[in-house]
Image (cartoon, rainbow, N blue to C red):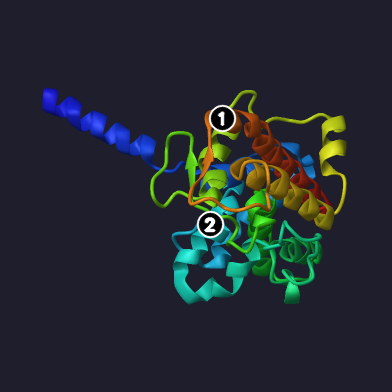
């Protein structure tokens, strides 16, 4: 019995130490769920109808039958090798947070997340586009709107969206943990799981406020969050200052930035709802 309990505690310790499936899964799924609850009924029927055709994608092992599955499809297909390698750069836009905001360089030839969001909306609006391509555009759109609202997909310091910034999350500091994975994982999970749940029907006033602006406006806003919160909170207040050997987010800092991370998820969900309503009306 003692050996069994020891094994269970060991398994629990490994589980708690492992990165949470946040923006990798949990964050994207939550953005999708928020959108699904806040789109018009006719839009919901159109989304369901397209996703029922997801077998046309021929991505066995990467289903997109529901909006939750579709929300992570664009990451899942990275495991399929060179078939979708052209889309790797579509998940982010490395806009330097220490220079004036400018999408021209990072979005050259449309190879960035905001340009692909706009492209996917156009494909969905065009009923002459083959069904397979519209299903793919829908799956990409659901995922990419989530990506845009993870601030380190929208702005960085030439460090691969914080992937090269070693960081500690509270007392947890494994060697490979970095600033990007903290925002993708632990911080996103805590933000989403902190009551009240962001998955709900929002008021008209809330929708009006959070859905305002264009994709470029949302890009600039997320880039600003990367500067003001993601980097500044990890680098002692100076987002463009020296990077220590290991940045640290203490518990007080984490508690302070959780609402920001949660707001980004809410914005992502409601803005995805807006784009789906526009594209599938």
Q: Nearer the viewer, residue 63 or 22?
A: 22
Q: Residue 171, labelled with which disc?
A: none
Q: Give the mark nearest the N terminus, 2 or 1.
A: 2
The answer to which image quadrant residue 257 occupies is top right
Q: Nearer the viewer, residue 29 or 43?
A: 29
Question: Which residue carries the number 1 mark?
Answer: 193
Q: Is residue 201 above or below residue 156?
A: above
10 Å neighbourhood of mark 2: few (<14), some, or many (≥20)?
some
Q: Quadrant of the N terminus?
A: top left
Is residue 33 found left or right of 6 in the rendered image? right
Q: Residue at x 74, y 49 (%)?
A: 222
* Disc 2 secondary structure class: loop
Q: Residue at x 51, y 49 (%)?
A: 181
The reply to whether residue 45 is in sight is: no
Residue 129 in picture, x, y percent from top left: 75, 71
The answer to which image quadrant residue 192 occupies is top right
**Spatial separation of the CA atoms under disc 2 and disc 1:** 24 Å
Q: Residue at x 50, y 65 (%)?
A: 78
The answer to which image quadrant residue 53 occupies is bottom right
Is residue 140 found left or right of 9 in the rendered image? right
Residue 7 in picture, x, y percent from top left: 19, 32
Residue 182 in picture, x, y percent from top left: 53, 44
The reply to whether residue 111 is in sight is: yes
Is residue 19 found left or right of 95 in the rendered image? left
In the rendered picture of this protein, how many numbered marks are placed on residues? 2
Labels 2 and 1 touching (C-beta < 8 A): no
Is residue 156 found left or right of 224 in the rendered image? left
10 Å neighbourhood of mark 1: few (<14), some, or many (≥20)?
few
Question: Which residue carries the number 2 mark?
Answer: 163
């Amino acid at each position: 019995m003692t050996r069994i309990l020891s094994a269970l505690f060991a398994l629990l310790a490994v589980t708690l130490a492992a990165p949470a499936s946040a923006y990798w899964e949990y964050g994207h799924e939550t953005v999708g769920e928020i959108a699904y609850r806040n789109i018009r009924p006719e839009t919901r029927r159109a989304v369901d109808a397209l996703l029922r055709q997801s077998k046309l994608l021929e991505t066995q092992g990467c289903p997109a039958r529901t909006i939750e599955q579709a929300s992570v499809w664009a990451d899942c297909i990275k495991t399929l090798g060179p078939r979708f390698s052209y889309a790797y750069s579509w998940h982010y836009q490395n806009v330097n947070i220490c220079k004036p905001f400018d999408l021209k360089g990072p979005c050259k030839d449309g190879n960035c997340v905001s340009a692909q969001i706009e492209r996917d909306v156009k494909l969905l609006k065009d009923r002459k586009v083959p069904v397979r391509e519209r299903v793919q555009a829908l799956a990409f759109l659901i995922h990419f709107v989530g990506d845009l609202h993870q601030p380190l997909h929208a702005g960085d310091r030439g460090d691969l969206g914080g992937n090269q910034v070693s960081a500690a999350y509270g007392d947890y500091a494994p060697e490979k943990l970095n600033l990007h994975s903290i925002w993708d994982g632990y911080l996103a999970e805590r933000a989403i799981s902190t009551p009240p749940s962001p998955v709900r029907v929002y008021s008209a006033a809330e929708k009006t406020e959070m859905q305002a602006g264009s994709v470029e406006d949302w890009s600039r806003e997320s880039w600003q969050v990367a500067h003001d919160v993601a980097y500044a909170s990890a680098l002692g207040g100076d987002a463009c200052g020296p990077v220590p050997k290991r940045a640290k987010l203490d518990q007080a800092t984490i508690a302070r930035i959780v609402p920001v991370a949660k707001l980004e998820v809410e914005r992502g969900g409601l803005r995805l709802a807006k784009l789906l309503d526009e594209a599938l009306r």
